Image (cartoon, grey):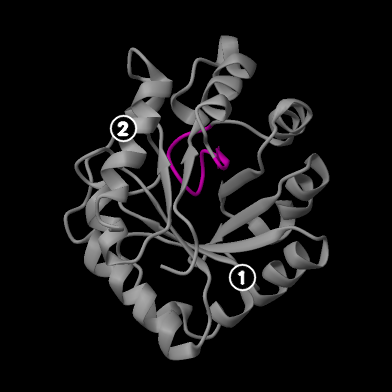
């Protein structure tokens, strides 16, 4: 593993009436990033948040904001999230008409750029863009809703992403999002993932801080 293991709790599962408290809680428990799921109700069948929430989070967050754009036209809207203070912006390979341009826009603004693969999108679609990105996000559920079941073939896809990175001589972070918990985290980490997004497994538990520690411990069992 090139990068140290990182946990990015997804605020999609947090209590939005106490969002600042939820963010502070997982930061205090050791979260390295805060994952922000932006959905437009068009690219995915759900509508979540936009730039004002990202801007508000930026004022309170002590760790970087990992903003995942599940939108139908990221080329048009990516600047909104950069202006709001996103530290990482991830766009879907399937959604961007001008992917290289979008990635270069993100990096040109000093943020880290990521690309996302839906479950049915082949890893080969990354070959031309991987040398230009800082992160690859592998969806282990179909995007749009939290709390979905982990797709069993996801570790093999993570391994294929890691193999392509090694072949190309690059080392982006490999992030996994969807159905991540103490059972599935070790599987994707063993396959090459080094950044885990978890929503329900953290925020929907009685003690989110304890749940985060347990998730990290479970994932770390495959690192020794």
Of 144 and 26, nearer the camera is: 26
- The residue at which mark 2 appears reads as 214
Quadrant of the rendering where the N terminus is positioned: bottom left
Quadrant of the rendering where the C terminus is positioned: bottom left
Magenta-highlighted stretch: main secondary structure?
Answer: loop
Q: Which residues are magenta?
A: 32-47
Q: Is residue 177 magenta?
A: no
Q: Is residue 34 magenta?
A: yes
For label 1, the crowd category at 10 Å Cα-Cα, with few meaning under 14, some 14 to 19 and many 20 or more, is: few
Q: Position of residue 16 (x, y in %)?
A: 56, 16
Of 55 and 180, nearer the camera is: 180
Establish if 119 lies above or below 61: below
Query: Residue 103 appears in which quarter of the rendering?
Result: bottom right
At x 37%, y 31%, the residue is 213
Query: Residue 178 appears in which quarter of the rendering?
Result: top left
Of 191 and 91, nearer the camera is: 191
**Left or right of residue 51, residue 93 in this image:** left
- The residue at which mark 1 appears reads as 97
Q: Position of residue 116 (x, y in %)?
A: 48, 61
Of 219 and 23, nearer the camera is: 219
């Amino acid at each position: 593993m090139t990068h140290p293991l990182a946990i990015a709790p997804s605020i999609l599962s947090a209590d939005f009436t106490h969002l600042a408290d939820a963010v502070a809680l997982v930061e205090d428990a050791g979260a390295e990033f805060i994952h922000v799921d932006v959905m437009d109700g068009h690219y995915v069948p759900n509508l979540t948040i936009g730039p004002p929430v990202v801007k508000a989070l930026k004022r309170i967050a002590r760790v970087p904001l990992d903003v995942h754009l599940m939108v139908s036209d990221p080329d048009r809207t990516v600047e909104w999230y950069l202006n709001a203070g996103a530290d990482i912006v991830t766009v879907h390979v399937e959604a961007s008409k001008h992917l290289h341009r979008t990635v270069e826009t993100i990096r040109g603004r000093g943020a880290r750029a990521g690309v996302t693969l839906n479950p049915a999108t082949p890893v080969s679609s990354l070959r031309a863009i991987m040398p230009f990105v800082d992160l690859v996000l592998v969806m282990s559920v179909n995007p749009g809703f939290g709390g979905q079941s982990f797709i069993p073939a996801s570790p093999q896809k993570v391994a294929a992403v890691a193999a392509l990175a090694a072949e190309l001589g690059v080392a982006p972070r490999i992030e996994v999002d969807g159905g991540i918990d103490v059972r599935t985290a070790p599987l994707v980490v063993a396959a090459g993932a080094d950044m885990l997004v978890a929503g329900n497994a953290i925020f929907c538990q009685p003690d989110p801080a304890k749940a985060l520690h347990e998730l990290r411990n479970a994932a770390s069992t495959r690192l020794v």
